[in-house]
Amino acid sequence: MDHDQTPTILLYHDDMFNLQSTATLLSSSPVEDCRHALILDSTIFHPQGGGQPSDTGFITDVTSSHFKFVVQDVRSRNGIVYHYGVFEKTVEDIEGGVQVMMSVDESKRKLNSRLHSAGHLLDVCLPKVGLSHLKPGKAYHFPDGPWVEYKGNVPQAELQSKQQELELEANNLISRGMKVSVAVYSYEEASMLCGGALPDYIPKGSTPRIVKLGDFPGCPCGGTHVSNISDLVNIKVTQMRTKKGVTKVYYNCL
């Protein structure tokens, strides 16, 4: 594969709700496990990253229905998005330049977006339940057991009550509803939207993509989200635990 290609245009950055779109196939190459990797000039498929699993779906030839490619996994490396999967039937080598139709699995995208948005909602709720000292760390928004991790401790004696308070506050905000907005800003604008400062991993002078829940401070994020926090319906905080200076919050969307 040509690693010097122009970075893939991420169409889902501009429109997270577009689940079908056309693109140009740049290359198709065999990889391990009898699979292939397709590279397109643009994509609506979200690659795995930021704690969010990848989209799945199909890529088909627009002009002649020559092939149907089942997208099983999507990854991004050096700005290039690789769509991994299998062809439904054996096809000859496919040359670049073919116009294709991308179709994202709607149910999986919606679930991933709900779980990711729920993680951000918990971030928003922490200060409201007296846990403003906890600072966001790693996150895992996969359906098999999502969690968010924060730097900082919660006294053992308070864990159960804080778990109940956090769940209650999150569901209170869900019942009220608030718009979820995602857009790219200049570094200075993004800093203001995120409470006056950006994390150190955001390069100065860059144009970060920021997600905001209502009027709460935003945060940098490359994932997909719901349009309104009411779409989460209900959050269950299943467990909270503190160990070695890290507090982990396990949750799910019901």
Image (spheres, rainbow, N blue to C red):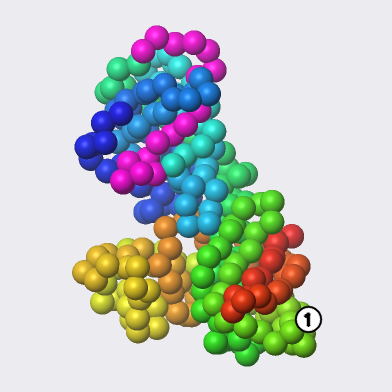
* Residue 228 in sight here: no
The residue lying toward the viewer, choosing from 144 and 213, is 144
Residue at 50%, 67% in the rendered image: 180
Looking at the rendering, in which quadrant would you find the C terminus?
bottom right
State the residue lying farthest toward the front.
244
Residue at 55%, 87% in the rendered image: 133
Residue at 37%, 74% in the rendered image: 199
Q: How many marks?
A: 1
Residue 41, image x, y percentages: 30, 36
Looking at the rendering, in which quadrant would you find the N terminus?
top left
Residue at 43%, 71% in the rendered image: 219
**Residue range highlighted in magenta:** 76-93
Q: Residues within 10 Å of mark 1 (few under 14, many from 20)?
A: few
Picture quarter containing residue 117?
A: bottom right
Picture quarter containing residue 194?
A: bottom left
Residue 128, image x, y percentages: 61, 87
196 part of magenta stretch: no
Question: Is 154 above or below relative to 146?
Answer: below
The residue lying toward the viewer, choosing from 54 and 240, is 240
**What kind of residue is marked 1?**
Gln
* SS class, disc 1: helix
Residue 247, image x, y percentages: 63, 75
91 part of magenta stretch: yes
Question: Is 50 above or below relative to 200?
Answer: above
Residue underneath mark 1:
160
Residue 39, image x, y percentages: 35, 32
Question: Is 171 above or below relative to 128?
Answer: above
Q: Is residue 102 left or right of residue 10?
A: right
The residue lying toward the viewer, choosing from 194 and 145, is 145
Picture quarter containing residue 2?
A: top left
* Residue 209 in sight here: yes
